[in-house]
Image (spheres, coloured by chain):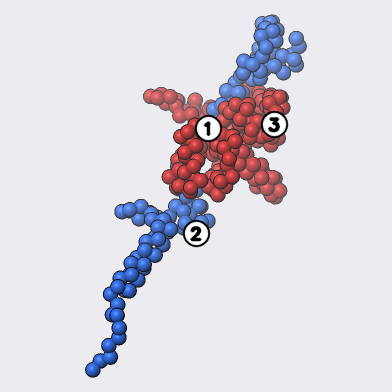
Chain colours: A red, B blue
Amino acid sequence: MSLAERLLIGRLKARDEQAFNEIVRRYGDKVFSLVYRMIGSRAEAEDIAQEVFVTVFKTIDGFRGESKFSTWLLRIAANQCKNRIKYLARRPAGTSSFDDAVDHASEGALPIPAQGHIDAPDVLMEAAEMESLTQAAIAGLEEDHRLLIVLRDVEELSYQEIGEITGLAEGTIKSRLHRARMAIKEHLDRNTR
Amino acid sequence: MDHGKASDLFSDYVEDSLPLAVKAELEQHLAVCIQCRTDLASFRQTVGALSRLKKAAPSSFLPSIQKQIYDRSRGRFFGRRWKLFGRIPFEWVSLAMIIAMLIYYIALMHGAPSGVHPSP
């Protein structure tokens, strides 16, 4: 952890509101993206991601700096996703969380088109369809496989960071991740090619 | 090498983490197996599609969190700031009041009449 980050965490522990704002600005997209891809619903994702940061504000004293702050933060996010997935699974049928898997790729989507370059509508539509299909494929995975795909392939974390978040050994992560990727590939092959 | 063994190695291959000997063996197989080449291309596309799924938080994200903390802390955090001086912590206000009362008490003691004189 860098000195600047250590100082920022120190200010957060003193309940400095500006430090908290800085934390949300730095990690907000990452947490929201993780939660959104895990849950598949924008409204649920907003709710959970906000709750993650409220939890951080309340429990920052429990962060002892043994891992990176981002790892600690994403572990909170992953746990809250798991709890919400369990809760949503108990809800009556017809209220699936994946109600907005087709979420209009243009809204809040990354990456933003390259400078000075705007894609043609058919390219944008194709990208939106691909995003929707890929999201649906992620939704079809088991919860732990889904988490690994999001942490590694969407958020591009290292295996060490994923190990710290999930508590899994690197070998286990790699084998599960490969199975999950193959399942997504098969889903996309069936639906696109 | 058969198709199954080859596809088991795809993840390590695209992440470039295969031992050199295994990588060479896989590449030899890929050179002669069109099915595995097609599968590998599709696998790469899949991993590429996943890497484009990042999602930005909505613009209302930070204000919504601040409001939640404000509500749950009953206004202790993220309250409206006093525009001129910023929000003054209530501990400072308490201290200032104690000092003011102390000064008033001392002034009262020094200015008080030494005795009570009955009116004529």
Query: Quick one: SS at disc 2?
Result: loop
Task: Examine the rendered structure and indicate whether residue B55 appears above or below residue A189.
Answer: below
Q: Amino acid at mark 2?
A: Arg
State if disc 2 and disc 1 touch (CB < 8 Å).
no
Q: Nearer the viewer, residue B66 or A107?
A: B66
Give the Cα distance between marks 1 and 3: 22 Å
Q: Is residue B57 visible?
A: no
Q: Which residue is mark 1?
A: A1
Q: Amino acid at mark 1?
A: Met
Question: In x, y percent, where is residue B54?
Answer: 53, 32
Residue visible at 45% across and 29% down in the picture = A112
Query: Quick one: SS at disc 3?
Result: loop
Q: Are marks 2 and 3 on the same chain?
A: no
Task: Examine the rendered structure and indicate whether residue A89 appears above or below residue B46.
Answer: below
Give the Cα distance between marks 1 and 2: 33 Å
Q: Which residue is mark 3?
A: A168
Question: In x, y percent, where is residue A174?
Answer: 68, 24
